Amino acid sequence: MAFTVTMLIQQNNLLSFLSGFVAVFLLWTILAYSISAGNSHILAHRISSLIISIDSPFLLALIGGLIGALTAGTAALAGSYVRQKPRRK
């Protein structure tokens, strides 16, 4: 989605990356935490203790959001590069 949006809306490369990064980071972090809160963070407590050795469901949601944000930011940057016209030498 980030790739398609930055192909359709012209932005510079940094702004393209940041818009994809921030949008998905906020979306995934809030969504993951709210889904986890629905079951009192039972699974998130166990997974965070196993993966990051800290019992913190919120930190687990932040890490998931960061992974998704880096992916979306890179896709948005690629969309920005595709939109640019090739430069002639």
Image (cartoon, grey):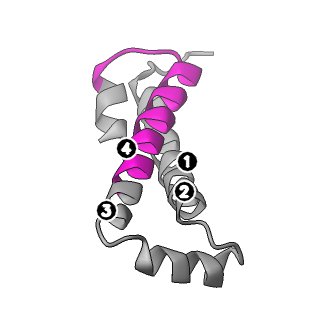
- Locate residue 5 relative to residue 70 in the image: left or right: left
- Looking at the rendering, the stretch of residues picked out in magenta corresponds to 8-31
Q: Closer to the observer: label 3 or label 2?
A: 3
What whole-number distance in Å separates the C-alpha atoms at marks 1 and 4?
A: 13 Å
What x and y, as percent, mark residue 2? 36, 38
Q: Is residue 58 above or below residue 45?
A: above
What's the residue type where badge 2 is placed? Ile
Circle 4/circle 2 CB separation < 8 Å: no
What's the residue type where badge 3 is placed? Ile
Query: Is residue 21 highlighted in magenta?
Result: yes
Reading the chain from its start, which is encountered first: label 1 or label 4?
Answer: 4
Reading the image, the residue beneath label 1 is: 70
Q: Is residue 83 above or below residue 88?
A: below
Q: Who's the residue at 39% across and 24% down the image?
A: 83
Q: Is residue 47 above or below residue 37?
A: below
What whole-number distance in Å separates the C-alpha atoms at marks 4 and 3?
A: 12 Å
Q: Who's the residue at 55% across and 17% down the image?
A: 87
Q: Nearer the viewer, residue 34 or 7?
A: 34
- Locate residue 42 relative to residue 1 in the image: left or right: right
What whole-number distance in Å separates the C-alpha atoms at marks 4 and 2?
A: 12 Å
Reading the image, the residue beneath label 4 is: 27
Q: Closer to the observer: label 1 or label 3?
A: 3
Reading the image, the residue beneath label 2 is: 67
What's the residue type where badge 1 is placed? Leu
Circle 1/circle 2 CB separation < 8 Å: yes
The C terminus sits in image quarter: top right
Which SS class for mark 4?
helix
